[in-house]
Amino acid sequence: MNSVKYNPIGTIHSPHKELHGMPIQPVGAKGVKGRIELNKEFEEGLKDLDGFSHIILIYDLHLCNSHSLKVKPFLDKVERGIFATRAPKRPNSIGMSVVRLEKIEGNILYISNVDVHDGTPLLDIKPYIPDFDATEGEKVVLGWYEDKHHEAKGKKSDKRFID
């Protein structure tokens, strides 16, 4: 298998200094402010991004040092396959979050609804576009999560995925 290498394009800054007690998804981080310091060499790529209210952040879960193919997700007590969860201990430590874009000043993006650990390496930014990213008109089936979604807003991380 070929190896794949990514270089960070910037750093995500947030008030979350400890993994324990962080919101588990942006829905539980409403109003939490943060910022992205994009490397200066990529600043030109921000052109026209300020017209979007939300962006998708793709980042390296740099504090995960191992992976598990079966995990007990934060919203469940049953062991699930890693690919049926959004748990951080993944074979490739890639995370994603949809956050609100507040403003851009030079190479600094001010964001809110941040559920990301302070100092997280940013790999990419994409505009959130409901026509592309939502499944409008299709029946969405949520598997084991179907009866858990009401718990996500108040759920904080515990120590289960900390090495």
Image: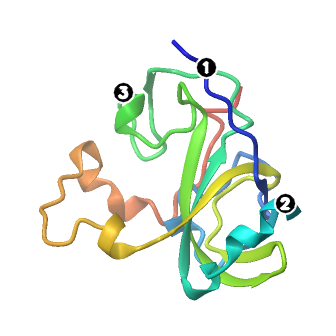
The quadrant of the rendering that contains the C terminus is top right
- Residue 57: quarter of image: bottom right
Q: Position of residue 60 (x, y in %)?
A: 67, 42
Residue 124, given in percent of the width and then of the height, sits at 63, 54
Label 3 belongs to which residue?
81
- Label 2 sits on residue: 41
Callout 1: SS: loop
Closer to viewer: mark 2 or mark 3: 2
Question: x, y (%) of residue 2?
Answer: 56, 16
Q: CA distance from mark 2 to mark 1?
A: 25 Å
Q: Amino acid at mark 1?
A: Ser
Q: Which residue is mark 1?
A: 3
Give the amino acid at mark 3: Gly
At 51% from the left edge and 12% from the top edge, which residue is drawn? 1
Instruction: Tell me whether the residue at label 2 lies in contact with that at label 3, contact meaning CB atoms closer than 8 angstroms.
Output: no
Dividing the picture into quadrants, the one containing residue 7 is top right
Secondary structure found at label 3: strand
Q: Quadrant of residue 26?
A: bottom right
**Residue 76 visible in this rendered orientation of the protein:** yes
Query: Does residue 159 appear to the left or right of 81 in the view shown?
Result: right
Q: Is residue 114 above or below residue 88?
A: below
Q: CA distance from mark 1 to mark 3?
A: 24 Å
- Tell me the amino acid under the disc marked 2: Glu
Q: Earlier in the sequence, mark 1 or mark 3?
A: 1
**Closer to us: 145 or 6:** 6
- Disc 2 crowd, CA 10 A, few/some/many (<14, 14-19, 20+): few
Q: Residues within 10 Å of mark 1 (few under 14, many from 20)?
A: few
Looking at the image, residue 159 sits to the left or right of residue 1; the answer is: right
Looking at the picture, how far across and down is residue 67, in whole percent? 57, 22
